[in-house]
């Protein structure tokens, strides 16, 4: 590996990207009306800047969305409609939306909002500076903000401490109302397949049970449940449901009652919180106004008992009651384009397929901004974004020194600083650097870019299809499944010997990579990212662990650390899925799916596919044993696969040899049909995978879609069986005898 990829010294000049496309910068003007002052935050949907409204010299916050859908007229129309609905929010505790637009100056959509100078509630909770009365006042304001929004038919869907800013005199502002709804605008269908196999991303620390279960309709009750989680955390100092594994949290939300509160708070407050956290949404408070009303009563009662309380507190609370009564008396239920009047006061807002797919993105923060055209460390020129995940964003880039195309994975800003600066980070990079195996995507280097304040990984760019694209269409042949099994097992055995556990083996992390000689190599992706996911789950409070539930080992669902046995289990599920065309356990509800996995008892593979050798079926079922110690190690799986291979004369399918002479092969011939060059490749199924279909490896900017067609083995030459030979001999003898008899 090239060892030149080091953290640059502070004196390294800031890289400057080309004029277009580029990220907005301080000093830029938008439509002659707004000037950007400085960037103050980066999120999933875009970046937030402090800005100035030039006409009135007003300080504002400007959110610039990623430019991907700027030229989509349908998207712009729907965005405009959503923004107008959110702009109706007019409440002391809701961020005001002043303006929005579509700017040719920045080639993006933008929103202009009220600027709030304050601190996130999450940071105050971490600091321990909040007392009982201050926490109550903050809780009342959040409830009042929700009550106002719900009356307008607007749900938050993503309420959490990070979306609450505490300003001067503890006046709070709730941010990002409708942001989850905005994410629906990116499409309605792309997420439906993901929910079928339980793909989830982010930490569902504040999700309601119905959100965990993927209900189609989300109501005000979900926001009330999320507020209940915040109240529990405010007064108890911890989350009610926590685990190192995301699915374990989902299960707790669905099935476990919140733990008893240990702090000495009023029983009426405890009762309210536990009522807000009821599993049955109909048992929760019917409105956020009711929650605010009870909280005000608790605060008033506390003020009357506390002699140290200032004398004007009672008047303050009474004014709060009066204000809320006035707000509550405004009985208006707007006929918004996606709302229905509910008989329980609030509005029931319909939820689209895309939101169901991203419903678990709850506290993921700080993904990298759009970077095409930028130059990292004066060496890697970003060409195009391939996809974003919880931990990173993947780009196609040109290594201008080596003059070749590579994949650059820019790590999230939310990667904990103590991890980025730790010895463990360096050790894990060294471990990944040492992984050199023909079936593992290779790490070429790493670095740190000062302009982004991000670490990044440089990997070989793999072009091809992932295994899930084949499994989705039909079950794979026995020959192909055997090749995949041996190649992935060989890679895992090698990695396990090196002390590396993958943690996320699934079809989308197994790639079919076309080679120059017409063969295709099987490659395993994302060893490095899995390591860093695990470390982040240890260092962050909420424990972000993305993954696909259908391929999780049972012990991981219980919150235990991933081991080599978990990798073997996941590979067993992959092989089962390849041969059957479906996973051993299926359910659109992630929690029910997890429960089925924990219970075990998958139908034997042989019952679905009769042509599978019994030895292979038994091996795969043993790999999926619920008890980790009952599973074979990867090297044992490899040995048994070799035995099955040779015993049953599995067809070689015109393969390229990649291992020792005695080993089975791990690549095979295929044909590719290349579509017209003007058709862009779709985004990869797994956004963390550096995949791009290219018609010409030398031209990194020509992305073309291709169809992978596995070539069938040539037919075996015809050979007579012994029985046929015996019959033929008898026929000849009879004919000779008959001819002799006639001659005489």
Image (spheres, rainbow, N blue to C red):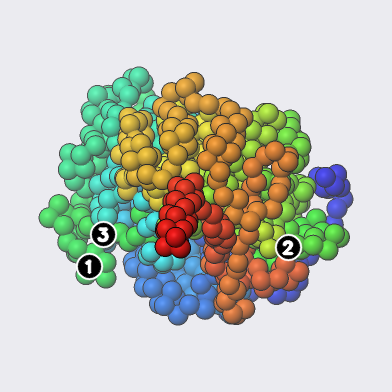
Disc 1 is placed on an element classified as loop
The reply to whether dot 2 and dot 3 touch (C-beta < 8 Å) is no
Of residues 335 and 640, the one drawn nearer to the viewer in this rendering: 640
Is 116 rendered above or below residue 72? above
Residue 254: x, y in percent? 29, 36
Is 479 rendered above or below residue 104? above
Quarter of the rendering containing residue 622: top left
Quarter of the rendering containing residue 600: top left
The reply to whether dot 2 and dot 1 touch (C-beta < 8 Å) is no
Left or right of 215 in this view: 394: right
Determine which residue is flagged by label 1. 334
- Determine the residue positioned at 21% across, 47% down: 287
Q: Earlier in the sequence, mark 3 or mark 1?
A: 1
Q: Residue furthest front?
A: 744
Is 470 rendered above or below residue 544? below
- Marking on residue 516: 2
Determine which residue is flagged by label 3. 349
Residue 161: x, y in percent? 44, 42
Q: Nearer the viewer, mark 3 or mark 1?
A: 3
């Amino acid at each position: 590996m090239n060892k030149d990829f080091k953290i640059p010294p502070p004196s390294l000049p800031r890289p400057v990207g080309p004029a277009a496309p580029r990220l907005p910068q301080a000093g830029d003007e938008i439509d002659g009306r707004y000037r950007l002052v400085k960037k103050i935050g980066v999120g999933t949907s875009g970046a937030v800047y402090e800005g100035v409204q030039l006409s009135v010299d007003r300080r504002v916050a400007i959110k610039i969305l990623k430019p991907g859908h700027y030229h989509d007229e349908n998207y712009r129309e729907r965005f405009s409609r959503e923004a107008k609905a959110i702009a109706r929010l007019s409440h002391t505790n809701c961020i005001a939306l002043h303006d929005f637009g579509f700017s040719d100056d920045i080639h993006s959509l933008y929103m202009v909002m009220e600027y709030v100078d304050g601190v996130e509630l999450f940071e105050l909770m971490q600091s321990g500076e909040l007392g009982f009365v201050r926490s109550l006042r903050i809780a009342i304001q959040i409830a009042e903000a929700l009550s106002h929004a719900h009356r307008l038919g607007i749900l938050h869907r993503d309420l959490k401490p990070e979306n609450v800013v505490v300003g001067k005199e503890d006046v709070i502002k709730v941010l990002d109302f409708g942001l989850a709804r905005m994410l629906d605008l990116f499409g309605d269908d792309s997420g439906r397949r993901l929910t079928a196999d339980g793909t989830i991303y982010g930490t569902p620390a504040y999700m309601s049970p119905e959100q965990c279960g993927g209900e189609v309709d989300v109501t005000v009750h979900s926001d009330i449940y999320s507020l209940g989680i915040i109240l529990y955390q405010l007064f108890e100092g911890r989350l009610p449901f926590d685990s190192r594994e995301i699915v374990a949290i989902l299960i707790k939300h669905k099935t476990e009652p919140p733990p008893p509160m240990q702090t000495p708070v009023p029983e009426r407050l405890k009762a309210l919180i536990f009522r807000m956290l009821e599993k049955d949404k109909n048992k929760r408070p019917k409105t956020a106004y009711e929650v605010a009303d009870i909280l005000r009563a608790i605060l008033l009662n506390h003020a009357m008992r506390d002699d140290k309380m200032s004398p004007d507190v009672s008047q303050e609370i009474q004014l709060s009651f009066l204000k809320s009564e006035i707000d509550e008396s405004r009985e208006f239920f707007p006929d918004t384009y996606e709302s229905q009047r509910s008989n329980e006061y609030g509005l029931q807002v319909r939820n689209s397929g895309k939101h169901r797919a991203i419903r678990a993105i709850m506290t993921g923060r700080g993904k990298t901004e759009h970077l095409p055209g930028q130059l990292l460390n004066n060496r890697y020129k970003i060409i195009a974004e391939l996809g974003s995940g919880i931990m990173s964003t993947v780009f196609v880039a040109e290594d201008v020194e080596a003059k070749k195309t590579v994949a650059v994975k820019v790590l999230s800003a939310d990667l904990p600083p103590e991890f980025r600066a730790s010895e463990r980070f360096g050790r894990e990079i060294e471990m990944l650097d040492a992984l050199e195996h023909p079936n593992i995507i290779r790490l070429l280097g790493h670095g740190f870019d000062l302009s982004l304040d991000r670490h990044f990984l440089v990997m070989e760019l793999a072009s091809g299809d992932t295994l899930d694209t084949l499994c989705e269409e039909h079950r794979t042949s026995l020959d192909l499944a055997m090749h995949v099994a041996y190649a992935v097992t060989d890679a895992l055995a090698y990695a396990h010997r090196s002390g590396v556990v993958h943690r996320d083996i699934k079809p989308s992390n197994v790639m079919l990579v076309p080679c120059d000689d017409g063969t295709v190599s099987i490659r395993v992706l994302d060893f490095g990212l899995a390591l860093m996911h695990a470390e982040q789950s240890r260092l962050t409070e909420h424990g972000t662990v993305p993954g696909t539930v259908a391929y999780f080992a049972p012990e991981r669902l219980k919150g235990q650390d991933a081991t080599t046995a978990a990798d073997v289990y996941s590979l067993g599920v992959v092989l089962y899925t390849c041969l059957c065309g479906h996973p051993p356990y299926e359910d659109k509800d992630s929690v029910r799916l997890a429960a089925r996995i924990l219970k075990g008892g998958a139908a034997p593979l042989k019952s679905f596919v009769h042509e599978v050798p019994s030895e292979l079926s038994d091996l795969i079922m043993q790999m999926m044993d619920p008890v980790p110690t009952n599973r074979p190690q990867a090297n044992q799986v490899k040995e048994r696969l070799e035995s099955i291979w040779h015993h049953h004369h599995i067809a070689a399918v015109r393969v390229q040899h990649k291992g020792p002479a005695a080993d089975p092969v791990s690549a095979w011939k295929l044909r590719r049909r290349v579509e017209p060059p003007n058709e862009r490749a779709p985004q990869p199924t797994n956004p963390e995978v550096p995949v791009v279909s290219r018609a010409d490896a030398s031209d990194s900017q020509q992305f073309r879609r291709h169809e992978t067609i596995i070539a069938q083995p040539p037919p075996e030459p015809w050979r007579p069986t012994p029985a046929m030979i015996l019959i033929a001999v008898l026929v000849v003898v009879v004919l000779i005898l008959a001819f002799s008899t006639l001659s005489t």
